Image (tube, rainbow, N blue to C red):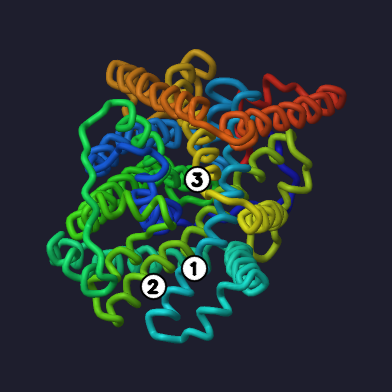
Amino acid sequence: MMEPAGRVTLAREMGVLGLTATGVCAMVGAGINIIPFMIQRNVPGIGPYVLPAFLFAALPAVLAGLAYAILASAMPRAGGSYVYASRGLSPYLGFVASFSQWFALCIAIGVVSYVLVPFVRDIAMAVEWRGVAGALETGPVRLTISLGVLWAAVAANLRGIAFYQRLVVPLMFLTFALGGVVIVAGFWFDAGDFSAALMARESRAIPTLASQFELWPFLSASAVLFASFIGFDAIAQAGGEARNPGRNLPLAIGLAVGLVAIFYLLFTAAVYHAVPWPYVAAESLQRDVTAPGLLGYLLPPFWTVVIVSAAAVALAKDLPAMLLATSRLMFAWAEDGIFPRAVAAVHPRHRTPHVAVVASGVMATLGVFGSHLAGDFFLGVDILVTAMLVNFLLMAVSVLTLPGRNPALAREITVLPNPVHRVPLAVLAVLVIGGFLAVHTIKDLTTPAAAWYFRSTWLWAVVMAAGTLLYWREVAKLTAAGVDLPARFAALPPE
């Protein structure tokens, strides 16, 4: 496809480090500081089996990461997951699945912006700035700070890839360094130390709870904990800005998934080593529990400030990477003509899809206001898990269907190029990810809920329906304009 002379394009300036940081920054945040502990309330009965469930949850993430790496090596373009499914499987499925992914990630960005403020409040409490802590509890202040942090991340994305990399790479190293304090502290202390600290501070003993392994709670918890691994796909969405993408995209995906999996397991094991699970389970029924809040019983104020700050940094650094991912999905849709063309505009100076970045920021803003009005944040987590499991399932299927649907692109695969090795792993990915999706859906539909709109499955279906209407409207416009749709979706979008 010939491009207009002087067309401004995205800048291929991201190296392996920037791409890896994008994946890590999109993955490590609320998932590690909150979900492994609030899972005790969300999945009653998981008890002492959180760590094995976390390990099992890594399996679909690894298989999905492999599928992404295979497809990224052949189709290195912005909006990776949409491009992969639309070229390898079906343009319709590629759009509606990535549309629900975009919606869920934008809402998640809003949730992260909103839940960041309590961590700042806890820092103020730890240094005994009680007036500041009290102010942070008020609705207007919390909303103002949440929106300020969100739009600061939008501004960082608008400045260009070079500026973005200078931001996220140090944040990645800072997150691992500060998280290391939690790991060391968790293994330094034990349950006896925590029991003594709890008795000294609150004159309470650790509750006694019985537990035995049950398969369904274990599988249900694994499906929820899988949410903690969501984010590495942000690397694929940046495919249009990666240097040497055929090599660097798969390498960065592998590094991000591997580093984060090790970090998650060490972090969770450390906290549960120091804090008995019966206490976590009992407290989760009364309030929102976090890793810093639990270890705060054992540490002096200075180190409490450090680990709460670590959680705040981990949350804040989610935002630039997640905004990059959502905006590049919108950019890719617009490039293909199935979304308003104006969204594909690239800033002439910074070479960023500025309209798409701002549009994602607007949707995330709705997530902030929704969080302010809503109750349990796990509804947002469940919607995100549903959307991403469907998306990852389509990636695995696309690995299988690409050679038949688009042989020319399939010949470009450099990660597991031999079908003898690639096909069995893709089949395994379909089975495992499909199994996780089935477990998550059954759990969602059978758990008591006050109304249908508190079930993530139905909310996800509503978003898919909205995406379907949008897709067919835009396709009708393209058809009326005489566009050769099969030819358009047989080739990659232009650079």
**Mark identifier at residue 118:** 1
Real-space Cα separation, disc 2 to disc 1, in angstroms? 11 Å
How far from the left and from the top, in percent, is residue 339?
74, 38
Residue in the picture at 66% in, 55% down: 373
Name the element at disc 1: helix
The image's mark for residue 309 is 2
User: In the picture, residue 300 is in which quadrant?
Assistant: bottom left
Give the residue type at disc 1.
Pro
Q: Which-is-in-front pick, marks 2 and 3?
A: 3
Quarter of the rendering containing residue 57: top left
Q: Using the numbered discs, state the Cα–Cα distance from disc 2 to disc 3 in whole angstroms.
A: 23 Å
Whichever of labels 2 and 3 marks the residue nearer the N terminus, that label is 2
Furthest-top residue in view?
Answer: 404
Of residue 54 and residue 327, the one placed in the foreground of this image is 54
Nearest to N terminus: mark 3 or mark 1: 1
Instruction: Report the side of 21 relative to 137 (left or right).
Output: left
Q: Position of residue 128 (x, y in %)?
A: 41, 86
Along the horizontal axis of the image, is 468 left or right of 226? right
Q: Quadrant of the C terminus?
A: top right
Mark 1 closeness class: few <14, some 14–19, many ≥20 residues within 10 Å = some
Within the image, what quadrant is residue 1 found in? Answer: top right
- Residue tagged by mark 3? 378
Q: Nearer the viewer, residue 54 or 429?
A: 54
Looking at this rendering, what residue extends furthest in the right direction?
480
Seen at 35% across and 24% down, the residue is 432
Callout 2 secondary element: helix
State the residue at coordinates (24%, 53%): 207
